Image: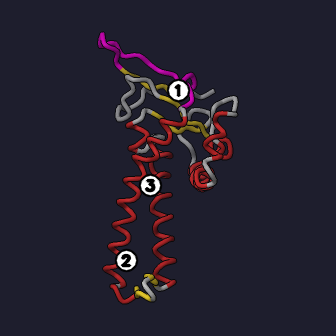
Amino acid sequence: MNAENTQSENKAGITTRHDESTYPRAGLPRRLAALLYDGFLVFAMWMFIGYAMLGIFGTDSNQVVDGVVQTDSVVSTLTFLLMVASSSGFYLWFWTRGGQTLGMISWRIKALSLDDRPMSIRQGIIRFFSAWPAFWLGGIGYLWLYFDKDNDALHDKLSATKVVLMPKGYKPFEKNPT
């Protein structure tokens, strides 16, 4: 197995190497906390997109009819597509580079391919688009990790990825040894 090794420094100042294949899988509370943190960032991107769309199309594409705001269907569809593209781009960028979004760094979890390498773009796309129904269908895809022998969520299984808990001394911005 091609395990990616990371290094950290213990209290005595001695640098040690870590084999990510031995790390435990991340539990549901950490995953949801990281998702909440990332949700704030994604929401901020969506607010910017909405502001940009307002600047491009103006307020003429919206109207209030019987107390309900109705938006032009083209503008609405374009906004939705930009929201999906920006959120998928956010996750794919972080997952395929270092395996961690900003929320995942905060909660010391890391998404990897099953061979302990950064996930491929294909794996990231499968993971992203299968995680949405896993969450919105009553969380059944996330609750799956309580029944899985490897403690993987359903979208982990579908994308051949895993989410591991990193040790307390892990420093995500240090270069890994080769």
Q: Which residue is mark 3?
A: 90
- Name the residue located 44 percent from the left edge and 41 percent from the top edge: 33
Q: Which residues are magenta?
A: 9-26
Q: Secondary structure at mark 3?
A: helix
- Tell me residue 35's x, y (percent): 46, 46
Between 173 and 56, the one lying in front of the other is: 56
Q: Amino acid at mark 1?
A: Glu
Distance of mark 3 from mark 1, alpha carbons? Answer: 24 Å
Mark positioned earlier in the residue sequence (3 or 1): 1
Locate the N terminus and report the quarter of the image it occupies: top right
Point out the residue furthest to the top here: 12
Q: From the viewer's perspective, tell me whether residue 164 is left or right of residue 90.
A: right
Between 12 and 54, the one lying in front of the other is: 54
Q: How is the image coloured?
A: secondary structure
Locate the C terminus and report the quarter of the image it occupies: top left
Q: Secondary structure at mark 1?
A: helix
Q: Amino acid at mark 3?
A: Phe
Q: Amino acid at mark 2?
A: Met
- Tell me residue 32's x, y (percent): 49, 42
Disc number lying in front (2 or 3): 2
Q: Which residue is mark 2?
A: 53
Q: Secondary structure at mark 2?
A: helix
Q: Which residue is mark 1?
A: 20
